[in-house]
Amino acid sequence: MERRRCCTAWIWTRPLRPGRYVTFLLRKRLPLGTLAVAPATALLDFFATRVSGSHFRLKPQGPAEDLTTATMLENLPAFAGRLSLRPDYDRQSLGWLVEEAARKKSHGNFRKALVRNEKGEILGWYLYYVCPGGISQVLQLNANKHTVEAVLQHLFYHAWKEGSLAVRGRLVPRFLDEISANQCTIQRGSSWTLVHSRNTELLQAIDRGDAFLSRLEAEWWMRFLGG
């Protein structure tokens, strides 16, 4: 029996420059009023990101190492953990997918970073679109429960250095606690996913968050109406 199900995606947002982020959200409603508060928000952000003890002050991170498809393929099984449903990539299919995602410019400049600890051990990685002066969008963030906070901090710092006002990504249920603990807001997204299968176990795995699904595995990044 064929079954279809629509799943609304939940998203998280981490403000990096809180004053200008709020102004960015309000500018369509109050385009003239936001100009008047611009100097004040810039001053607010200056102190918010530099005062000791502030939630918006980020710890400097090491350089971002370029992530290769070979590294993704080798480490994906370990980072997918015990998830019942995960993508079955090979070098050609994953390479094509990443190359096509990098061609899209409507979201910003594509970046892919591998994160290691001081011993050189891989902690995880992230792929995202850098948007200076706007909201940078995460395409995929991969880690495990013990390393995801370090990967998040690396992402936030480098997005901040690039001039982003905030970072946004699709909520991964297994990382809910870590995302919430890192000053991220969580809300229902405007996009949705249509799941179609005759296999009820597959549908149930997606429903309970037991599936490896990121924006890379769906059509979100394609944005059929833009380049």
Image (cartoon, rainbow, N blue to C red):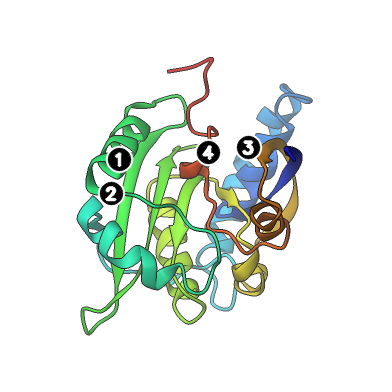
Q: Pointers 2 and 3 in contact (CB under 8 A)?
A: no
Of labels 4 and 3, earlier in sequence is 3
Q: Which mark is residue 38?
A: 3
Secondary structure found at label 1: helix
Q: CA distance from mark 4 to mark 3?
A: 37 Å
- Residue at (68%, 36%) from the top-left corner? 194
**Residue 119 relative to residue 21: left or right:** left
Q: Pointers 1 and 2 in contact (CB under 8 A)?
A: yes
Query: Residue 132: percent from the left, percent from the top?
Result: 44, 38
Residue kind at label 1, given as amino acid type: Ser
Q: Which residue is mark 4?
A: 218
Query: Residue 119: percent from the left, percent from the top?
Result: 22, 84
Residue kind at label 2, given as amino acid type: Asp
Viewer-nearest residue: 165 or 2: 2
Q: Which residue is mark 1?
A: 93
Secondary structure found at label 2: loop
Q: Which mark is residue 35?
A: none
Q: CA distance from mark 1 to mark 3?
A: 45 Å
Q: Residue 206: which quarter of the image?
A: bottom right
